[in-house]
Amino acid sequence: MPLIAIASPKGGVGKTTLTAHLAGILAGRGYRVTVLDLDPQNALRLHMGVSIREEGGFMASIQASDGWKSALLDTDCGAKLLPFGAAEPADVLDIATALATRPDLLAGPVRQMLADPDLVLLVDTPPGPGSALAALYPMTDLMVLVLLADAGSASLVPQIAQNRFMGRGSLATRAAERAVVVLNQFDARAPLSAAVLEMAQRALCHRLLGAVARDEAVAEALADKRLLTDGASGAAEDMQVIADQVVRRAGLRPPGTRRPGFSALSEWG
Ligand SMILES: Nc1ncnc2c1ncn2[C@@H]1O[C@H](COP(=O)(O)OP(=O)(O)OP(=O)(O)O)[C@@H](O)[C@H]1O
Ligand SMILES: [Mg+2]
């Protein structure tokens, strides 16, 4: 049921890495997880052990409306994946324009996915706002913003603290209010990392979800087509802690437990 979007005003900060790991960790804990890739780079599949030769996907053919179920792939970690799919640059522009005028092309299928009360939907996004993410604003329960522990990211913290980073308008502001922040590639020995962490803690308070260590094992795991789901220290442990926080902030019920139903309400709805 909950939709958790992983986003950032910046590129190359670890959105896809964190999305794949949250999917793996939550699936490993027994949650039923689907991951949707909204980024035309179509890279999430590589983090999740899918072959580079696999070119099918959901977003790339969203206007042809083949349905989303036929694009679902099983992955090694147990989560299901809806890759973006291979798309030419002209098609990517076309999809973005189509979603700006017809957000329901994406919002409709996602609403169907979210009708499953046991499903956790994680969404990986390209950098910045964009029409695909905007189509999902009204349905987003939690937005996890990834930043680096560097000066470029630090300069964005005030905008995030004031809920202005998604742009103007009620829907963008409401989505921004549901944002929490993860500082990635944190280096406990680097004074700059420590200063950015302190500044982010001050400005964001409880909205700072945590930090993930800079750890070579992250890139090595990707090169090996596996997730870094177990490890006593470094990024693996930090991502488990972030997953604990996501479970809490998104209000995920323990797998297998159901919210009490109100049958009359579902009949009327
Ligand atoms: N904690 C970490 N420690 C070391 N390297 C990391 C860490 N997190 C991510 N990386 C590396 O940083 C690079 C960028 O990560 P990733 O692709 O997840 O970022 P992104 O925000 O999804 O990028 P894009 O904006 O292009 O979609 C990758 O090479 C990844 O292996
Ligand atoms: Mg990415």
Image: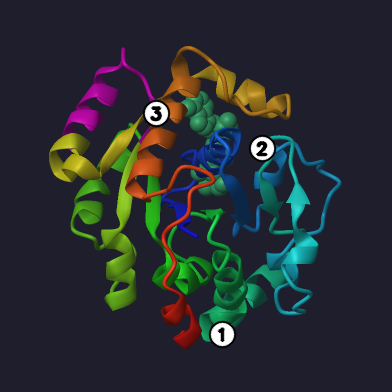
Identify the amino acid type marked 1: Arg
Q: Above or below — where is 21 with respect to 81? A: above
Label 2: few (<14), some or many (≥20) within 10 Å? many
Seen from the viewer's position, the closer of residues 70 and 254 is 254
Q: SS at mark 1?
A: loop
Residue under numbered circle 1: 102
Q: Which residues lie in the magenta part?
A: 183-199
For residue 107, side relative to residue 187 (left or right): right
Mark 1 and mark 3 lie on one chain; the one further toward the N terminus is: 1
For residue 19, side relative to residue 160 (left or right): right
Question: Is ligand 1 less than 8 Å from the beta carbon at label 2?
Answer: yes
Q: Above or below — where is 188 with respect to 41? A: above
Label 3: few (<14), some or many (≥20) within 10 Å? some
Do tag 1 and tag 3 residues touch (Cβ < 8 Å)? no
Indicate the position of residue 221 as horizontal and vertical percent values: 65, 24
| Residue that lies at the very extreme toward the left in this rendered image | 202
Marks 1/2: CA–CA distance:
30 Å
Residue under numbered circle 3: 241
Identify the amino acid type marked 3: Val
Instruction: Please name the residue shown 59% across and 24% down the image.
Output: 228
Indicate the position of residue 172 as horizontal and vertical percent values: 33, 70
Q: Above or below — where is 232 with respect to 113? A: above
Marks 2/3: CA–CA distance:
20 Å
Q: Nearer the viewer, mark 1 or mark 3?
A: 3
Instruction: Please name the residue shown 39% across and 42% down the image.
Output: 246
Instruction: Please name the residue shown 62% across and 52% down the image.
Output: 34
Q: SS at mark 2?
A: helix
Q: Decide whether residue 9 is among the magenta residues.
A: no
Q: Decide whether residue 186 is among the magenta residues.
A: yes
Residue under numbered circle 2: 47
Identify the amino acid type marked 2: His
